[in-house]
Amino acid sequence: MLPLAAGIPVSLLLGFLGVRVLRRAKKMGGLPDRLVGVFFLSMAIGTMPALLAGDERLVPATHARLAMALGHAVLSVGFAALYVFAWKCFGPRSSWRRAVALTGMAVLALLWAVQGLTEQFAAPGGSAVRATGLVRATALAWAFGESLRYRLMMRRRAQLGLADPVVANRFLLWCWWTGALLAANAVVVLFRFLVGDLEHVSPALHTAVVICISSLGLASGVSLWLAFFPPPAYILRLRAGAA
């Protein structure tokens, strides 16, 4: 289970970013922005019930399963939005991308149902939760891979003076925010497979994991902020460097 000490600050940060990106998308339009906003807001909203459900001091046992069900449902909606983002942003006419996105969404919905039928949404969850984590990690890995591919293409074009350095840098920032979340997700999935419950490890390891996840969440947030809301000084620096 993701520790509360890391989960709550990361959730608040992602929620703030999600609201800001959605407000920007409402003003400027653009499906990718909306999907990113939905993803980050779902991450923030969905993580909280799933986190709190594992602590009987915060959520009574009678409501823990409902909280887990709600949290995982919202998280699956967010990762479904990320699947659609990778499809619509990097290849809206690509048949294989459409197939991957639709399959990922269907598998997320199926695993949520399986989790309810086989595990009754008991915290921290078992095989269904672990499988769901892998499907979510696949969405992040796909978005990261697409961003990296476009980053390499845009960097070469920028070196030849054929691309805007600000646009080229945006794909680098997309690599950072997707890559940081992928790394944080990998840490959580790894512990689910190897340890099962992070609360039962040594205090030193628990602290290290909290610091790691918090740092990756912060790195992702800063990267996303610079990608969608770059300060004027940051843009001037990029253009000056290109010149």
Image: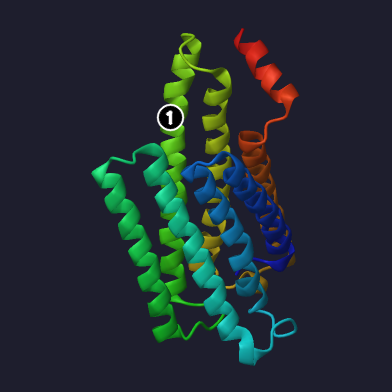
Query: In the picture provided, is 95 more to the left or to the right than 228?
Result: left
Three-letter residue code for mark 1: Tyr
Residue 236 sits in which quadrant?
Answer: top right
Which corner quadrant holds the C terminus? top right
Q: Which residue lies under the disc numbered 1?
A: 150
Q: Residue 99: percent from the left, percent from the top? A: 27, 52
Point 39% across, 38% down: residue: 90
Position of residue 85 relative to residue 173, above or below, is below
Point 57% across, 72% down: residue: 71
Q: Residue 6: percent from the left, percent from the top? A: 70, 60
Query: In the picture provided, is 200 more to the left or to the right than 193?
Result: right
Position of residue 46 relative to residue 166, above or below, is below
Point 47% across, 58% down: residue: 79
Q: Residue 57: percent from the left, percent from the top? A: 75, 84
Q: Secondary structure at mark 1?
A: helix
Residue furthest to the bottom: 62
Residue furthest to the front: 27
Q: Is residue 18 visible?
A: yes
Q: Is residue 194 visible?
A: no
Position of residue 47 relative to residue 178, above or below, is below
Which corner quadrant holds the N terminus? bottom right
Point 70% across, 85% down: residue: 56
Q: Around disc 1, counting alpha carbons within 10 Å, would you say few (fewer than 14), some (14 to 19), or many (20 or more)?
A: some
| Residue nearest the viewer, comparing 193 with 93 | 93
Q: Residue 44: percent from the left, percent from the top? A: 63, 61
| Residue nearest the viewer, comparing 120 with 238 | 238
